[in-house]
Amino acid sequence: MEKQEILKLMKSRVVSDYLLEQASRDANFQKGMTFGTGGVRAKVGIGSNKMNDVTVAKIYLDIVNYIKSVKKEESGVLIFFDTRHGSKHFAHLGAKIFKAKNINCELSTRALPTPTLSYSVLRHKFFLGIVVTASHNPFTDIGIKVYNEFGNQITDNDLDKMQVHMDTESPEIVTVLNELTNEENFSTDVYEDEYNEFIANNFKSLEKRLELDKIDLVYSPIHGVGKNVIPKLLSSFDFINVNLVEQQMVGDGFFKTVDSPNPESLESFTYAFSKANKTKSEVVLLTDPDADRLGSAESDGNDWRIFNGNELGALFVAFLIEINWNNLNGFILSSVVSSDLTDKMAKANNLNF
């Protein structure tokens, strides 16, 4: 082929897309994945640095080895998933692997929030909890978030002990995947009701102080698991003016109404603000796909004020000061990346911090 013909082909869309695809495919195999903060998160796709059955099986086998190293097979694992595409599939894959490796495992029957998992792990004394989610990341991503026996995100020290199979080309992976069966007798659905009951019993006494029946609010789960839980919780209290964003109450794993389902981004409030302006609501609440991140905004009558995480934390502490949280034997916990304002507020008011 003449040089000019080759150059002409290289400029064509077909060849360019082919070359880009090959380059991307090669890059996908250049390195593997590692455990990061709370687990592993990456794009779904082909390759050793993408989330697929092989790489996810490696993650689960590393967790299997960790559980066996501390002899916690009987305490086992509880697995939840959210509404994003691939989440339920990878959750079921994990449950099958744990069962095949003789580790006690239970799996939720439907998509449920991460806070529900934290509570359930502690209540039922599981050794670990796993949520298959990429939190507020775009729909292209999936993740395996790991929680310890106290319902907290697992520490980096423990994650380092798990990093075995992801660093190797383990032939065990193929064997494990080939030997898995379609039998599924590990699912249960008690966790949602237990968590809702816990919330109602422990916070019902606070609603009398808040005049919740006078608040007109809008809520959206941004297509996530909050749709299954939050409206029920709101109705169990004195909230009587709750307006739901219908377009985002659908469990859509592509999150079609937003670029990224981050409840703290301005773009995620578009549908909720539209609903609130029509219903003349004064408060907007959003949750991310696994419902462990909250977005909030308040109307001043003319415009909307979106609160960031640190501001919400300060408002929560102000409320705890108002109700004399110490008399309820309560503690306030703060992460190392949070503002020190809550620390100062708590100490100034002699709260347990």
Image: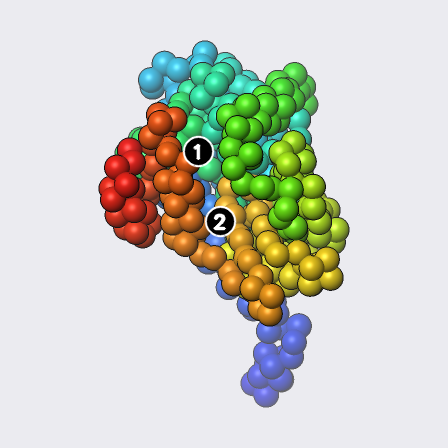
In this rendering, would 60 be left or right of 279? left
Q: Along the line of sight, which residue is nearer the eye, 170 or 113?
A: 113
Q: Is residue 71 above or below residue 29?
A: above
Circle 1: residue type:
Val
Could you say which disc has been placed on residue 174 in the image? Answer: none
Q: Label 2's element?
A: strand
Circle 2: residue type:
Ala
Pinpoint residue 197: horizontal percent, then vertical percent. 59, 23
Residue at image position (49%, 49%) is 42
The quarter of the image holding the C terminus is top left
In this rendering, would 80 be left or right of 148? right
In this rendering, would 43 be left or right of 32? right
Residue at image position (57%, 47%) is 287
The quarter of the image holding the N terminus is bottom right
Pinpoint residue 137: horizontal percent, then vertical percent. 52, 52
Which residue is tagged 2? 42
User: Crowdedness of circle 1 by 10 Å Cα count: few (<14), some, many (20+)?
Assistant: many
Which residue is tagged 1? 146
Pinpoint residue 100: horizontal percent, then vertical percent. 54, 18
Residue 229: name its quadrant: top right
Whichever of callouts 2 and 1 sits on the residue coming sooner in the sequence is 2
The nearer-to-camera label among 2 and 1 is 1
Single out the residue that lies furthest toward the top.
Answer: 74
Q: Is residue 304 above or below residue 289?
A: below
Residue 212: name its quadrant: top right
User: Crowdedness of circle 2 by 10 Å Cα count: few (<14), some, many (20+)?
Assistant: some
Residue 353 visible: no
Q: Label 1's element?
A: strand
In this rendering, would 82 be left or right of 332? right
Residue 129 visible: yes
